[in-house]
Image (tube, rainbow, N blue to C red):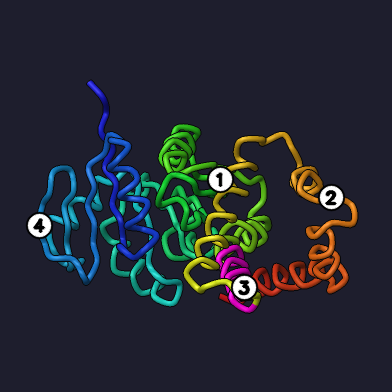
Amino acid sequence: MVNRHNIVLIGYGKMGSALHQGWLKADFPATYSIISPSQLPRSEGSCHYYNDVQDSAFQEALKNADIVMMAVKPQKMREVCAQIKPYVSVSSLILSIAAGQTLQTFEGYFSAQQPIIRSMPNTPSAIGKGVTGYVCNDACSDTQKQLVHDLLNISGAVYELNSEDLIDPLSAISGSGPAYLFYFTEALTQAGIDAGLPADVAADLARQTMVGAGALMEAAPDTPPSTLRENVTSPGGTTQAALSIMMNGDMQDIITKAIHAAVSRAKEL
């Protein structure tokens, strides 16, 4: 008989709900207890929804949890942790997906003996194409680490980091990265419109080009992006003319500054 894990989700926003829906689709063996002010109390299959921490059934779920996933906004984290702490077993694993909340911060909310994993997924996790990095405190057992790795791996690639200092740079690249690509797609669309294309055609061309380029990189994981770029770039051709504008405009410097800004902001949260 497959062992079913007890997973409690604190918060059910875009990321928390996306991860949960992915686990359901993958039929991960678990029973879920979800609390969010926006949820109507109800039970649906393996999922039990609550909207009040004072609900005795929810408190019982907390006491028996294998994993308690914290998916609330950083600004609300202290308050929420204080509300649930009396009901969380010291053996339960705290899994955070919140930005800017360190392991030490959570040890302050609970204790240094509480197993805690700080993770940073991204939005493509909702379709199984995500990237998640995570780091563990010393209280985590190998079994707990493997359980979280298996759980997060459902949503895409997973990387265990050997230092918490790497979480903020990872967040700046993969956590925020989809937004950069969406912005580039917007800019490419507008450039197409400015060049005379109908708006709908420009939007479709830009979107499908991004999708196709990503699929090429996925299909050739051992081929550097620079090689894929060179394969499209004929000497003296149109692609080279366009890339020269980008490179002469020091796009690399702009991207580097943007990443540094994201890292700095993460440290302020």
Label 4 and label 3: CA atoms lie apart by: 44 Å
- Look at the picture and state if 256 lies above or below 125: below
Q: Pointer 4: residues within 10 angstroms few (<14), some, or many (20+)?
A: few
- Nearer the observer: mark 1 or 2; the answer is 2
Look at label 2 and name its amino acid. Ser
Label 3 and label 2: CA atoms lie apart by: 23 Å
Element under disc 3: helix
Q: Nearer the viewer, residue 230 or 87?
A: 230
Counting from the top left corner in percent of width and height, residue 159 is at 59, 43
Element under disc 4: strand
Q: Nearer the viewer, residue 144 or 27?
A: 27
What predominant SS class does the magenta segment belong to?
helix
Look at label 1 and name its amino acid. Asp
Q: Pointer 1: residues within 10 angstroms few (<14), some, or many (20+)?
A: few
Image quarter (top left, top right, bottom left or bottom right) of the N terminus: top left
Residue sitting at the far left: 42
Labelled pair 3, 2 in contact (Cβ < 8 Å): no
| Highlighted range, magenta | 180-194
Look at label 4 and name its amino acid. Arg
* Residue bearing the label numbered 2: 234
- Nearer the observer: mark 4 or 3; the answer is 3
Q: Quadrant of residue 185?
A: bottom right
Name the residue at 23% across, 62% down. Answer: 35
* Residue bearing the label numbered 3: 187
Q: How many marks?
A: 4
Element under disc 1: loop
* Residue bearing the label numbered 1: 138
Label 1 and label 3: CA atoms lie apart by: 45 Å
Label 4 and label 2: CA atoms lie apart by: 60 Å
Between discs 4 and 2, the one toward the N terminus: 4
Between discs 4 and 3, the one toward the N terminus: 4
Labelled pair 4, 1 in contact (Cβ < 8 Å): no
